[in-house]
Image (cartoon, coloured by chain):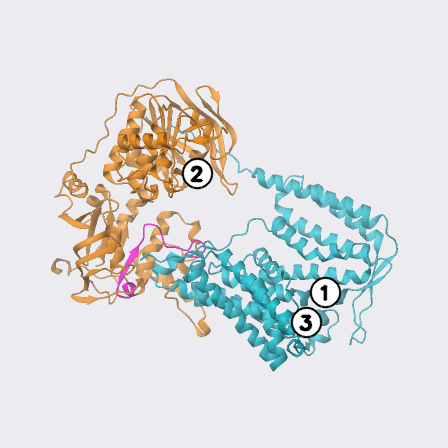
Chain colours: A cyan, B orange
Amino acid sequence: MAATQVSKVSKPAISPTRLRQTRLIGVILLILSVFVAVFFAWPVSGDASFRLAYPGDAFPLPNLIVPAAPYAWVVAALLAFFGVRQFLPGATRWTGLLFGLGLLLLVTAFLTWATAGKSFSLTGMLQATIIRSVPIALGGLAGVLCERVAVVNIAIEGMLLAGAFTGAVIGSLFGGTVGVLAAMLVGGAFGLLLAALVVTYRVDQIIAGVAINLLVLGLTSYMSSQVLTHHRELNNAPIFKAIDIPILSDLPLIGPIFFQHNIFVYGALIMVAIATYYLFHTRSGLRARAVGEHPEAADTLGIDVYRLRYINVTLGGMVAGFGGAWFTLGSVGRFDENMTNGRGFIGLAAMIFGRWHPVGALLAALVFGFADSLQQKLAILQTPIPAEFLAMAPYIATIVLVAGLIGRARPPAADGKPYIKGH
Amino acid sequence: MAAPFQEVQSVRQGARSLDIELRAITKRFGDLVANSNVNLSIRGGEILGLLGENGAGKSTLMNVLSGFYRPNEGQILIDGKQVQFSGPGDAIRAGIGMVHQHFMLVPVFTVAENVVLGVEPTGPVDYLDMKKAREQVRTINDEYGLEVDPDALIEDLPVGIQQRVEILKVLFRSAEVLVFDEPTAVLTPQEVTEFYKIVRMLRDAGKALVFITHKLHEIHEVADRISVLRGGKIVGEGFPGKTSDKELAEMMVGRPVTFNVAKGDFKPGATLLEVKNMTVLRDDDSVAVDDVSFSVRSGEIVGIAGVQGNGQTQLEEALSGLRRVTSGTVKFDGADITNSSARALHRMGFAHVPEDRQHSGMVSDFSIAENMALNTYYAEPFSHGIVMDWKTVRETSARNAAAFDVRTSSIYKPAGELSGGNQQKMIIAREMSRNTRFLLASQPTRGLDVGSIEYIHKRIVAARDEGDGVIIISSELDEILALSDRILVMFKGRIVAEFADGVRQPSKNEIGLAMAGAVA
């Protein structure tokens, strides 16, 4: 008897989970369409006037006038079309893109509705977007550096806060530059502490991170209420001034958005660029990634797993320390209790949304920064939405993006696992 | 002693032939003596077969040689000179390369990235020169004819090719001694043949090779000289062709071993389990089991062969109530049991020996007694209402441990401290010490010693002779051939071939081809 052939050809099936997800997104888009029609298009009248230039710009652009009601109707129609598209054949391929586009349109419709009959500085909001992304992007970058060597760094929040505090105090005493350097040193020290806890002593990474967060929160809150309130001179740091990049900063629209910032924005960009080069184009980066993916393999090749984990986590801490200094030296010039307010955790979300890539984390941070600046600027427009709800925007954006849009991103394979050398 | 090999042409320029001498090596882990006073010589141009059961100390010895462990006593001599390794890096630099049983490759890296890792070509500012790396890899690749694409991602490559990448890795580091730890465990028969060719080619190029295995036929096929390790000591030497299987097995186990499984006459009864058009998905929603239909009669052992990762795991999980059947039906004794819970199946008389015993067969930190009650702890006689009856649990466990040859000093010891063979016997005791009607066993003897394999095979055949329906899922062809009354071959989620016993015994090669997807 020869082998009985029982195989047959069947077509590749789209998984039911995927199909369910697509349908769900379709329903959400349809609901959003109705929402836009009822709340943004139906009751509104007048034009929304978006200011694109600052007074005194070299090449002033005219205002962008958008008729509010017609625009909202168009958005509602597009959303409805995107929603229906999810139920037609071949929908799964476009789901992510259309959902993202749909959310973007929703935001523009919301802005137009809020601005109807008034005027709103679009340039100002976008500039604020960049500024507010800084701590999130740096937090995310710190996360990337740590998780690429498989150390989960929940302590970024605490490292930001420590950086903010150090920046304020040292900055008040010795000037901004020294303040920034000190903030990076303190951030790095907490990175070193985390590395010691999780690499050498194999403390659970989440617990070690939470412990550092609580430690920093407690320490800085105590110092701030007991010391800084009595010695105001210790909490009065200089703020870094914006540096205009020659020529580029004079460009209309783009100039103020991208090229009129202080060192924190430029520093974040440079750090992202260096980190990308380091992780993906250097020998050390290759080894670091190997340690995060398959530490045993790295070990068999004579690569020191522990040493690389120490180095990268410490570097991550320094980046977070720099990001923390933004809160004081780059923004308000003084330290307030818990002033980071969860930005470190949003940074971690940016890292995941950015798929453990420095540039990805930066782009994701821009999305969160946009939500952040949106809520701040909308408060000026006096919309009927309560301020508390607006303040929730960055966090809602986090949930929507992390839960809904990213799908299944793949973290480094050994992420979060301690490595024990065989001896 | 190296004289007969001097005429061997060295393929690589400047290649040196190393002679390695392990002298009186002793390695202890706490109280456990893994190697005791071991002497071993490894020579260039020769394949040394290191034979021994699991736990005999083969891997420990080789880990000493490759710098992972430091011996407590003894010396390593290279070309007569004593050396000391403080880490794997030192051993690599001395020319000793190890190909581990579980590949040490980063799945998301390319072949070239994996090969150069640790000895990367660089430019200024630590720049990783991948262009040069690819060229270097290609050079070695061509030199030995390994035919691996430097730009392929590891996770996209079949296991046989991944192994070549491992070989490429050690060759790239100019290794003169290559140690292979159980290299054929994960390969298809065809890949094994290819692998033997590569090993012989490396020997002819003057390399010294150490081939660690517990499979006798492999040793005969490939080794030039055999050393047998038992209980951490070298217990004998032999030469393939001259030393018989029986002698080697006796040296390895320490007592005479029977190779054949005694089976009663094949008297199949009524159809017991019927699977129709079953489709099962993996966690990532890809199709693992694709529209599969088959049946199992009472008193019949159906062996499911296939290279790992072709859907057998998901098939096993679906049949044992651990994974949802997406479409199709499963009938047991005429009743529909599709997506029944594991407990419901258990009550119907299903015995399940899972693929990964540490992960899904037992709770390592629980005692042997507790583990023995895991499947029926909720029912009489182990509990009355919500109260556990520990006395009965202990008594039953002690009885079953004795009946199923679970060797332990105490049933209160954590199950994780048992050897693999005794863990498996414990699971079999738990599953089969009841009135069973069906046995589903996946990789029932993976990684076990010859003695335990013998015992477990006997138990499986006994279940069949008593009229149970039996499914054996195994990637060990020998096991499938020894036990099965009927053989199904799985490839990419489908059953691509069926061989019925009594009609004609299929050759290993025939099944091997089907396992690789080439249906005759």
Tell me whether marks 3 and 2 sit on the same chain. no
- Tell me the amino acid under the disc marked 1: Leu
Q: Secondary structure at mark 1?
A: helix
Query: Subunit of mark 2?
Result: B
**Mark nearer the viewer, 2 or 1:** 1
Residue A91 rendering spot, x and y as whole percentages? 64, 42
Which dot marks residue A331?
3
- Tell me the amino acid under the disc marked 2: Lys
**Badges 2 and 1: C-beta atoms under 8 Å apart?**
no
**Mark nearer the viewer, 3 or 1:** 3
Q: Main secondary structure of the magenta part?
A: loop
What residue is shown at x 29% (from left), y 56% (from top)?
Answer: B98
Label 1: how many residues lie within 10 Å, few (<14), some (14-19) or many (20+)? Answer: many
Q: Earlier in the sequence, mark 3 or mark 1?
A: 1
Residue B107 part of the magenta segment: yes
**Mark nearer the viewer, 3 or 2:** 3
Viewer can see residue B519: yes
Label 3: how many residues lie within 10 Å, few (<14), some (14-19) or many (20+)? Answer: some
Tell me whether marks 2 and 1 sit on the same chain. no
Q: Secondary structure at mark 2?
A: loop
Which dot marks residue B492?
2
For residue B214, what is the image quadrant?
Answer: top left
Question: Magenta stretch?
Answer: B90-110
Which dot marks residue A126?
1
Image height check: is A267 above or below B391? below
Residue B311 part of the magenta segment: no
**Residue at mark 3 to residue at mark 2: CA–CA distance:** 58 Å
What residue is shown at x 81% (from left), y 61% (from top)?
Answer: A381
- Tell me the amino acid under the disc marked 3: Ser
Residue B1 rendering spot, x and y as whole percentages? 11, 59
